[in-house]
């Protein structure tokens, strides 16, 4: 560990010169930083930026998030996926209001106790918002540390992951020794590791000549950068099929809201049904899904999307009806295209709505 001082100084200097100007880096508000860290899970930075900006305008404080309707929260999150994250954010906000008088906790133990917050997120908030020497270990940091220290074992193995956490702790603890007035070395060190992994020490084609740690990197010295970290064998993708129905009744479309406890709970969707293969007997599938047989049914579009390792091909059909049927229980309703825009949809069903709008063309303003 003799090289720790050199590594830390190199990382801090590099970060001050090269850090991207991201909106959540312009604040030390733990709430704003927490929102960014949760959004960045499983999502790229360029996608998160407009969502984060919109979220902070709509819910500028913990209290505003805590008192919001679930439907508002989900609508603001719609398109980011993994909607449990949004529900956990609101649950945590309500817990902060009740247990911490609306003030974001500063203690690691209190932060990690919040719904949806794990060791990485708690460490990121403690270090970035409060400049505490708490380590972080995400995919980018794992790759950087594995290469610098020449760790060849699978980073997902318990022993290897423990070693990586220890290294991350040593680095941020050493950074704390550089504390001076108006400096934030713990925050900068952790963000430097994340930034380096995102922009220089990338999974493929890393830019080693630009790396501030190249002199100390074992993977580079041993010409093993492409081999480290060890590749985890991914399970094979599973292919699934489903059918969805955009049924029009006098300019209104049938949608339903998923119940609590289901995947995508409280989100809205067009009626759909999982099938074992591409749809062949459309009327039969429609009857099973809707409880009635629509008229003029025809193929409309195909939406391909992925959930974890499941690759889903969603075949969408349009049709009409003029019967008195009002929906599938109290969680269903008929809505105009304008009304549908006010609802929170998962991304696959948002694409169906966009396709319907494109087909309808510009709407004439009322006279």
Image (cartoon, rainbow, N blue to C red):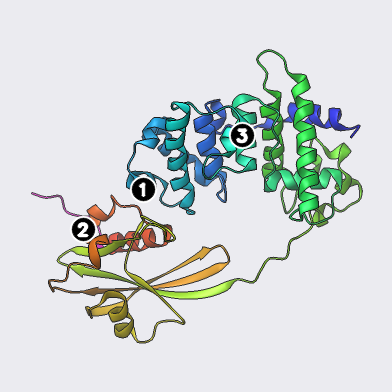
Could you give the CA–CA distance between mark 3 and mark 2, rounded to whole angstroms?
47 Å
Q: CA distance from mark 1 to mark 2?
A: 17 Å
Point out the image quarter for the N terminus. Answer: top right
Q: Nearer the viewer, residue 346 or 302?
A: 346
Query: Which residue in the protein does label 2 denote?
Result: 336
Residue at left 41%, top 38%?
Answer: 54
Q: Residues within 10 Å of mark 3 (few under 14, many from 20)?
A: few
Closest to the camera, between mark 1 and mark 3, is 3
Q: Which residues are magenta?
A: 360-367
Residue 145's label in the rendered image is none
Task: Label the magenta part by its dominant secondary structure.
Answer: loop
Looking at the image, residue 190 sits to the left or right of residue 103; the answer is right
Residue 47 in the image: above or below residue 154: above
Q: Is residue 184 above or below residue 272?
A: above
Residue 357: quadrant of the picture: bottom left
Side of 149 relative to 319 (left or right): right
Residue at point 82%, 37% (across, down) = 213
| Disc 1 to disc 3, C-alpha distance | 31 Å
Q: Earlier in the sequence, mark 1 or mark 2?
A: 1
Give the number of the mark in front: 1 or 2: 1
Q: Which residue is at the front of the view, 264 or 21? A: 264
Q: Say whether residue 133 is visible.
A: yes
Q: Is residue 266 above or below residue 293?
A: above
Q: Residues within 10 Å of mark 1 (few under 14, many from 20)?
A: some
Residue bearing the label numbered 1? 75
Could you say which disc has been placed on residue 109 in the image?
3
Instruction: Please tell me in which quadrant of the rendered image residue 193 appears.
Output: top right
Q: Position of residue 281 (x, y in %)?
A: 35, 87
The residue lying at 67 percent from left, 44 percent from top is 198
Q: What SS does tag 3 mark?
A: helix
SS at circle 1: helix
């Amino acid at each position: 560990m003799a090289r720790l001082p050199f590594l830390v100084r190199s990382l801090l200097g590099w970060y001050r010169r090269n850090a991207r100007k991201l909106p959540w880096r312009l604040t030390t508000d733990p709430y704003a930083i927490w929102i960014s860290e949760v959004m960045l899970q499983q999502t790229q930075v360029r996608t998160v930026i407009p969502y984060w900006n919109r979220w902070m305008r709509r819910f500028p404080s913990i209290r505003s998030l805590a008192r919001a309707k679930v439907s508002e929260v989900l609508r603001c999150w719609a398109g980011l996926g993994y909607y449990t994250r949004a529900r956990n954010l609101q649950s945590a906000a309500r817990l902060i209001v009740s247990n911490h008088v609306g003030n974001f906790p500063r203690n690691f133990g209190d932060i990690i106790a919040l719904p949806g917050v794990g060791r990485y997120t708690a460490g990121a908030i403690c270090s970035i918002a409060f400049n505490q020497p708490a380590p972080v270990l995400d995919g980018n940091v794992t790759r950087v540390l594995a290469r610098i220290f020449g760790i060849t074992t699978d980073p997902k193995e318990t022993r290897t992951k423990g070693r990586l956490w220890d290294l991350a702790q040593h680095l941020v603890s050493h950074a704390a020794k550089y504390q001076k007035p108006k400096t934030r070395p713990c925050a900068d060190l952790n963000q430097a590791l994340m930034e380096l992994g995102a922009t220089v020490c990338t999974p493929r084609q890393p830019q080693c000549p630009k790396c501030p740690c190249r002199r100390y990197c074992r993977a580079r010295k041993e010409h093993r950068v492409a081999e480290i970290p060890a590749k985890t064998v991914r399970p094979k993708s599973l292919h699934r099929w489903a059918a969805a129905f955009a049924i029009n009744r006098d300019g209104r479309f049938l949608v339903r809201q998923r119940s609590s406890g289901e995947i995508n709970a409280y989100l809205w969707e067009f009626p759909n049904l999982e099938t074992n293969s591409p749809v062949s007997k459309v009327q039969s599938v429609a009857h099973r899904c809707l409880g009635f047989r629509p008229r003029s049914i025809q193929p409309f579009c195909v939406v391909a999307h992925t959930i974890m390792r499941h690759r889903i091909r969603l075949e969408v059909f349009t049709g009409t009806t003029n019967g008195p049927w009002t929906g599938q229980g109290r969680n269903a309703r008929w809505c105009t295209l304008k009304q549908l825009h006010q609802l929170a949809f998962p991304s696959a069903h948002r694409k169906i709505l966009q396709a319907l709008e494109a087909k309808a063309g510009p709407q004439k303003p009322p006279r």
